Amino acid sequence: MNVNNQFKNSVFVKLFDDPDLLRELYCALEGVTLPADAPVSINTLENVTFMDFNNDISFEIAGKLIVLIEHQSTINPNMAVRLLIYIAHILEAMIKSKTLYSTKQISIPRPEFFVLYNGSAPYPDEVIMKLSDHYEKLQDLGLDEKLRPLLELEVKVLNINEGRNEHIVKRCRKLSEYSTFVARVKDYTDEHKNKEEGIKTAIKFCVKHGILEEFLEINAREVLSMLLTEWNLEDCIAYRNEEIREEYRSIIADKDAEIADKNAELARLRAELEKTTRQ
């Protein structure tokens, strides 16, 4: 999954672009042990992106599991819906249409979904997001709610910031070092008040102290570019969200003024009516 002109990978995706590391990462996330020779094949779909930013990892383990991991610095409450769409694309690519109409039952790998969070906003160690949380309520139609939805998808959201979920992070050395690297980037960026200088200082610090040393030595320039791109994207989203909020404030202010004018006119008409009645 090399960076190209169309899609921009995250540092996380580039770091874990290795079957052995992905096997180790999955074992850490689920607290299990898999055979070292269990084959892992990466099947990330590079045309399923958000604002041309490819931030997902999808891989298959021994044909038994499909693991989808999304790395986020800002929690998106719609992850269950997004990953439902993503897994549908994955399965579509895996299964030939003609086999769906076979008289023989087909088998598919079991899907598992993770979001790894390392943003600055406070967040619990673990949260489970469910597809069923998005379903419309049926009471208005006079229907009873089902005890169990017929279509469900659960996403395990894990906080991987430094000092959080240490029992998970310590099981995967690269994940531990990545969490430390991100923490140093945040520290030095705050200290320098300049993103680029902060990232450069964090890279030098981590190389000196053996944190992702080889990866950063080889990919320092690309890591810098990736992180600046990620933050620019976050700034763009934050700016657009503020624009939307301002638009709503303006609309609400206009409506409030309109209501006030109508209330004043109504009060005037009532006063005239009372005056006419007294006469």
Image (tube, rainbow, N blue to C red):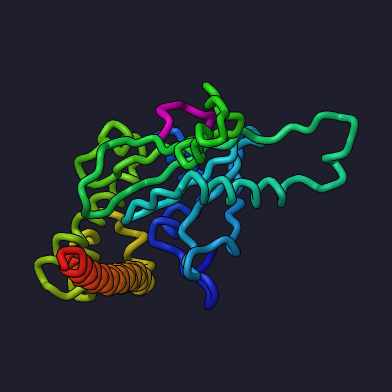
Q: Nearer the viewer, residue 128 or 203?
A: 128
Q: Position of residue 180 (x, y in %)?
A: 23, 51
Q: Residue furthest right?
A: 103
Q: Which residues are magenta?
A: 29-35
The image quadrant that residue 167 belongs to is top left
Which residue is pictured at 36% across the width and 72% down the height?
Answer: 229
Which residue is pictured at 82% across the width and 47% down the height?
Answer: 97
> Quick check: can you spot residue 217?
yes
State whether residue 28 is above or below residue 12. Answer: above
Instruction: Give the quadrant of the N terminus.
Output: bottom right
Instruction: Please tell me whether the stretch drawn in magenta is mainly helix, strand or loop.
Output: loop
- Tell me if residue 30 is in the magenta stretch: yes
Q: Nearer the viewer, residue 144 or 37?
A: 144
Which residue is pictured at 27% across the width and 73% down the height?
Answer: 258
State whether residue 32 is above or below residue 61. Answer: above
Which residue is pictured at 59% across the width and 50% down the height?
Answer: 85
Would residue 84 be found to the left or right of residue 207 on screen?
A: right
> Quick check: can you spot residue 242?
no
The image quadrant that residue 37 belongs to is top right
Q: Residue furthest left?
A: 191
Instruction: Give the quadrant of the C terminus.
Output: bottom left
Would residue 62 be found to the left or right of residue 153 on screen?
A: right
Q: Residue furthest top?
A: 147
Q: Residue furthest front?
A: 279
Q: Nearer the viewer, residue 151 or 120?
A: 151
Q: Nearer the viewer, residue 217 or 135?
A: 135
